[in-house]
Image: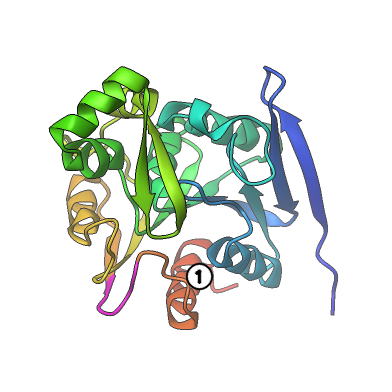
Amino acid sequence: MQTVAQEVGETDRGDGVALAWVRTLGRGPTTVFLPGFRSDMTGAKAMLAEAFCAEHKTACLRLDYSGHGASGGVFTDGTIGRWTDDALVLIDRLTEGPLVLVGSSMGGWIALLAALARPERVAGLIGIAAAPDFTEELMWQAMMPDERAQLERDGVLHVPSLYGDPTPVTAALIADGRTRLLLDRPIPLRCPARLLHGRRDPDVPWQTALRLAERLEADDVQVSLIKDGDHRLSRPSDLALLSRALGDLLLQDGA
């Protein structure tokens, strides 16, 4: 079996914070996996993307935003804009040519923002339970008046999570997210897009995928709703759907 060349490293984003990444070398387009909120580049979907790329000899980049995984920085210093900039720093320094951006949950929002920042490079998008605008629609709008008051007073609110310790939600995260909302207008991206979403997602409504599909100006947009799928979409059957989506966008020549 042929060994695939891989590099592991850290890149200073310019202010002393080191961003961790793993790069698999190969031909283009380069797949870039963008993790979710409080997630990292070692999850099942990220590893599936890397394995798919290795099998087909295409390039892949996995990364951790600041305050996540193996990267430096403090989670509560992060915002959607800061984490998008983190991703763009690594994309610009570590990749060349066309890109397929794969975003999970919050990573779906960051993928859209990164694509809007580098539209000439993006050859395709994959959203896995993509969550654009979640800070406003799923956090701020879900807060009770006393919670909003506490957030504005203290600068942070700890929200119970299904996945472990309470989630620290900062006032800066909400304020920054409010400047980057996408679902209230057409999204001027015309690359092919594949949107996977579970109908039993307890965190991000599956209707978000339909709203996103409607907002994207591209014609080649396909939505796959998994009737018994949850938010993580990490079961073998879910990962098989992700593989098919990657094949659609990476292997259009049948390679």
Instruction: Name the residue nearer the viewer: 8 or 17.
Output: 17
Residue at 59% x, 36% y: name it: 67
The residue carrying pointer 1 sits among few (fewer than 14), some (14 to 19) or many (20 or more) residues within 10 Å by Cα, namely: some
Is 218 colored magenta in this rendering?
no
The residue pinned by badge 1 equals: 247
Q: In the displayed structure, would residue 239 be above or below residue 92? A: below
Element at label 1: helix
The overriding secondary structure of the stretch rendered in magenta is loop
Q: In this view, does 82 lie to the left or right of 69?
A: left
Range of residues picked out in magenta: 225-230
- The image quadrant that residue 224 belongs to is bottom left
Instruction: Name the residue nearer the viewer: 176 or 162.
Output: 162
- The image quadrant that residue 144 belongs to is top left
Please identify the quadrant where the C terminus is shown.
bottom right
Question: Looking at the picture, how far across and down is residue 88, in whole percent?
Answer: 56, 32
Question: Looking at the picture, how far across and down is residue 9, in whole percent?
Answer: 79, 42
Q: In the displayed structure, would residue 174 be above or below residue 242? A: above
Residue at 30% x, 18% y: name it: 153
Q: In this view, does 200 lie to the left or right of 242?
A: left
Query: Which three-letter amino acid code belongs to the residue tagged 1?
Result: Gly
